[in-house]
Image (spheres, rainbow, N blue to C red):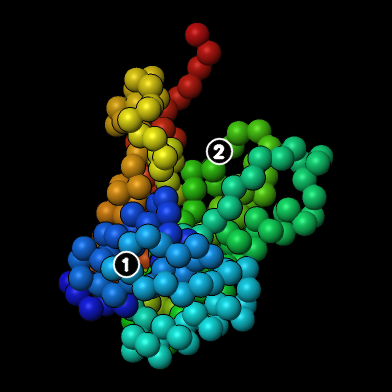
């Protein structure tokens, strides 16, 4: 169903984005990785893009259509995470996180929609849109914004038959899965920490044309962590 579909994955050179891009390649899609870093996988196409730049996003979409003929699926995955006390969080850092995580998702969706004829957009939110650790204000605000942006865009793009959804990952280990402790896994209802492939599978589901009744929705993929009641013992 994804054979020859043109898929753009922002931030697709590593981590969750790389797993998403690889999964679409396996399904026969034409995958364009929009990133500052070139992916190691030569089965993907690379267009260097700073997602904080409106001009570079516009160029990304235009070049994709010029080279590959269409845009069928957009995965807004690019993101930045910072931990800084709110009393020390500078406006420069705040803007950097918001522009990387939230504004880029809007700009990419806006520009891609000008070329899309139906299709699907999926953005990466986070369970941190609903719960927080200390000093994550900028990141939490950006991810909460993505959830609101998702249902707004779903309404606005409905006439174009473009579905718009988002995914809120929990703990997804992208570095050293084998190095995790037993307690890391056992604290999840699923009894394991998440893998990038868990998110990639959800992207395939949400962008499958047979699932086009799903739009404006956020799917939490966190092994059940946000459903636990935690008490001190």
Query: Tag 1 or tag 2, which sits nearer the N-term?
Result: 1
Going by the picture, which residue comes out furthest to the top?
233
Q: Is residue 1 visible?
A: yes
Task: Please tell me in which quadrant of the rendered image residue 49 appears.
Answer: bottom right
4 lies above or below 23: below
Q: What is the distance, in whole Å, between disc 2 and disc 1 at their CAs?
A: 38 Å
Q: Residues within 10 Å of mark 1 (few under 14, many from 20)?
A: few
Q: Nearer the viewer, mark 2 or mark 1?
A: 1
Residue 93: x %, y % from top left: 73, 53
65 lies above or below 13: below
Q: Secondary structure at mark 1?
A: loop
Q: Is residue 76 visible?
A: no
Q: Residue at x 59, y 37 (%)?
A: 132
- Picture disc at residue 101: none
Q: Residue at x 58, y 59 (%)?
A: 101
| Quadrant of the drawing holding the N terminus | bottom left
The residue singled out by tag 2 in the image is: 131
Q: Residue at x 81, y 41 (%)?
A: 88
């Amino acid at each position: 169903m994804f054979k020859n579909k043109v898929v753009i994955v922002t931030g697709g050179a590593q981590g969750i984005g790389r797993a998403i891009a690889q999964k679409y390649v396996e399904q026969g899609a034409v995958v364009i990785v929009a990133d500052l870093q070139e992916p190691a996988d030569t089965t993907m196409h690379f267009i260097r893009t700073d997602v904080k730049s409106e001009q570079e996003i516009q160029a990304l979409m235009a070049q994709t259509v010029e080279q590959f003929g269409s845009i069928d699926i957009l995965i807004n995955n690019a993101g930045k995470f910072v931990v800084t006390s709110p009393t020390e969080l500078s406006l420069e850092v705040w803007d950097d996180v918001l522009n990387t995580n939230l504004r880029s998702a809007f700009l990419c969706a806006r520009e891609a929609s000008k070329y899309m004829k139906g299709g699907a957009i999926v953005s990466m939110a986070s369970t941190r849109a609903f719960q927080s650790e200390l000093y994550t204000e900028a990141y939490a605000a950006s991810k909460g914004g993505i959830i609101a942006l998702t249902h707004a865009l779903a309404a606005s793009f409905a006439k174009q038959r473009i579905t718009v959804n988002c995914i809120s990952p929990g703990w997804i280990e992208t570095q050293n899965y084998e190095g995790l402790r037993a307690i890391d896994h056992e604290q999840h209802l699923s009894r394991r920490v998440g893998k990038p492939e868990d998110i990639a599978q959800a992207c395939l589901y949400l962008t499958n044309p047979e699932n086009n009744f799903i739009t404006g929705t956020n799917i939490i993929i966190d092994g059940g962590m946000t459903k636990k009641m935690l008490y001190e013992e």
